Structures are given as structure tokens and as C-alpha cells.
Image: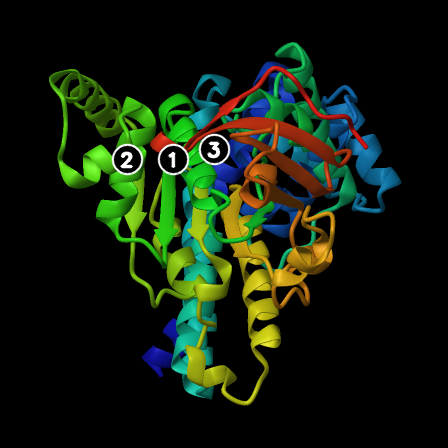
Amino acid sequence: MAMETDLLYRQMPHDLVAEQAVLGSMLIDQDCIKDVMDKLQPGDFYLQQNRDIFETMYTMFCYSQPIDPVTVVGQMQQNGLYQEDVTQGYIVQLMDVTPTTANVMEYVALVRGKSLLRSVAMAAGEITAMVQEGGVPEDVLEAAEQKIYAVRRGRASQDMIPVGTVLAGVLDNLEALSAQGGRLPGISSGFSSIDDKISGLNKSDLILLAARPGMGKTSLALNIALNVGKSSGKTVAMFSLEMSKEQLATRLLSSEALVENNRLITGDLRETDWVKVAGAASVLARSDIRLDDNPLLTVSDMSAKCRRIDNLGLVVIDYLQLMTSAGGTARHQNESRQQAVSDISRMLKIMAKELQVPVLCLSQLSRANEKRDDKRPMLSDLRESGAIEQDADIVLFIFREDYYQADSDKRNIAELIVAKNRHGETGKVELKWMPEFTTFDTLERRFSED
């Protein structure tokens, strides 16, 4: 009987006193409202009545309406949340029980902490239910990780959010960008001509960089990773399914030191080269670029590794066609490779949205372009394209005319073709290709925007 009584009265974690103190502080002192709104959502309140009051104030705040006891009661009447002989008295009580508005952020921390514990408890219950139902272990693990990661990021993955709430964040972001003088909304790639075209590397974007072998797609990806690692102060995660960690590090060293790559491979270094290498090694050591050369990684593996990085700024994957699906190759033994690659590209887009970072994924092109007079790649040249071009927010192609024509007057000049761009127009920019250092540089001259 005692156990049944315990189960009956067992409640989810909450602190009603802290909830009341937060609401009371907001009603007494309007100056603290903006600070509270940055930290709490309506769902953080346990008691429905408290949640209704906060949600009313939250909506009013989004539309810059004045917030005080009278206006809040009036708004609740309009919204059908007003209870006769209850609501007005409760709002007066909220102000009466608030000790001081000076400690409002401490009350907020208590409410947020209890909300976090409730989210963990709910996720744990859902995970337990999944385990009891059975299913593919890898899928259960992936779903469990996603639920816990959603809690860590402070959101419930299944919640629907009113457009007004979303709009408030969009307007705040717009205001911040305007105050910065129209600076790039995303992280700079380190190439001004590329940034101008695609507005930098933006959160939740899947950016596909595709080319025929030998065009330098790995080199450009490494250049961008190095630039982001040096300038953004954020962590870059690079997954290479083709090259070893040592090869990648050598390439990075060659690009930063501007020492010929073959000299680094053979060790045939001059005294001046050693000085450059030492300086470049110091720069690389200060930037947080993390390398993983496990050739059997799945999207789920990569996502799980990236979730553990606190200050993640960019994910680079080299390259798409070498990846296996979530359940390994056996899972798709009865499916076409095109379907498997399409599934992988979709999972990469989901990963970018979940991690809220740009994901730069390299891809091979088919030989279709080599049969045409104009060898410039097109979207239809993407190997096993399927949903790749649909999932990607930005598709970039590298094309070097001198690769096909030795006597070309565009020697060591690469065209970066923006074939798809959800943030703006398509077109071309040109980059300087330095094969001895396996690196790219920016050229001032631009191609026409045809």
C-alpha cells in the first residue's frame, strides 16, 4: 500500500516557489523581462496556470507590448485564459510572494534546472519504452542519442513552436546583423569571392563540393577548414574516409607554410623551409581542427562524435560516395547504391540541422561531363545523384580548363561554379590554383555571373 501511495504522489521535478518568484519579478520590474525571456520558454513552467501567464507575457514581449499586471490580465481575457475570481487574485499573489526582483536570475536558474530534469526524465522514459519494444539496436541507440542531445540543446524534438516565437528570434538576428554593418551571416570560408556568392558558411547548411578526381576538391575543403579553424575560434571536425590523418596534416602544413608538398613527403627540406614549417605548425596547433580517418564511419557515428564537441563551427566530410549507411552496407544489400547514397545525403542534411552548423561534404562526379564539348560540370553529373542535389542547400563544382587543355590561357586558374544556392544567385567565381602547395587562393578578377 505504501508503494502504491508513493507512486500516486510522486511528481516530476518542479519548484513552484521559484516559478512564482520569476513571474512576480516580471510583473513588478519590466527591466528584468528581456533577461528572463532569453533563458526560459513557456514549457519550462510546471504548473499550467504559471505556464499560461508566462506564455501571455512571452507573446506580449514578442510584439513589444507593455507588460504590467493590468495589461497581462487584459491579454489573458482576450486569449480565453482568464478565470473569474482566480486569475486576478493569483497575479496579485505572485507579486506579493516575490521577495526581491534582484534575485530574478537565480529563480530563473531554479526553474530551468527543474525543467531540464523533467526533460531528462521524459527522454529516459521514451528510451526505456523503445528498448522494451525491441528493434534494430543501432536505430535505438541513434534515437536515444538524439533525444538526449535535444535535451542538451534545450529543446524537445517533438515540440511545435508558434510562428510568432520563431519570428521574434528572426527579428533579433536581423537586428544584430544590421548592427554589424551587414557583415556575413555565416562563418567566413576565408575566400572573399566565395563568401560574397554564398553569404559564408551558414548554420544547418549542407554544402556539397563536387568535382572530377584531380581537380582539387580535398585541397579546397582543407583550405576552408584551415581558414575557419584559424579565424573563427571554433572547432572544425574533419572526417576523411580516403586519406590518413598524417596525409591530411601534411596537406594542411603545406598550405599554411607554402612549402612544396613533395618536399614535405620526401623530407627534402631547405633551411628556409624548416622556418616556414615551424611557423605553420605553431599556427595549426593553435587552431582546433580535429581529424578522423576511420573509413567505416556512418552518418550516425559522425553525428555522435560531433555532438560531444561544445564549440563546433564546421563539419567536413571527404567524401560522400565512400560512406556507408546507418546500419552498414549489409542493410542496403538489396537496394541500389543510388538509394543508399540518397539516404546518406538526407541524413547529412538532418545532421546539419540538428547540430546547427554548416556541413561541407565532398562528392565525386560521373564521367558524363567528359563526353561533352563543354567539360564544365552540371547538377546532372552528380554520381548516384538521386536526392543529393535536392538535399544540398549549396552545390559547388570545381573546374580547371588546363586539366583538359594543356595550352589553356587559364593555366592554374580554377572556376568554382555555384550550381545551386538557396541563399542567393548562382554563378561562377575564379580562384588561383597552386599545385605545388596543393592550395587555392583568391583572385580579384571575377567571371561573369551568367
Residue 390 seen in the figure: no
> In which image quadrant can residue 414 be found?
top right
What type is the residue that disc 1 sits on?
Answer: Thr
Residue sitting at 37 percent across and 52 percent down? Answer: 239
Is residue 192 or residue 136 the one in the foreground?
Answer: 192
**The C terminus appears in which quarter of the rendering?**
top right
Q: CA distance from mark 1 to mark 2?
A: 7 Å
* Three-letter residue code for mark 2: Asn
Residue at left 31%, top 34%?
252
SS for dot 2: helix
Which element type, helix, strand or loop, lies under badge 1?
Answer: loop
Is 54 or 212 nearer to us in this picture?
212
User: Could you tell which of marks 2 and 3 lies nearer the N-terminus?
Assistant: 3
Residue type at the position of mark 3: Val
**How many angstroms separate mark 2 from mark 3 (CA)?**
55 Å
Q: Which disc number belongs to residue 108? A: 3
Q: Nearer the viewer, residue 137 or 409?
A: 409
Q: Is residue 236 left or right of residue 265?
A: right
Coordinates of residue 59 in the picture (x, y in percent): 75, 34
Task: Residue 260 in the image: state x and y as whole percent.
Answer: 28, 30
Relative to 28, residue 164 above or below: below
Q: Earlier in the sequence, mark 1 or mark 2?
A: 2
Disc 2 designates what residue? 261
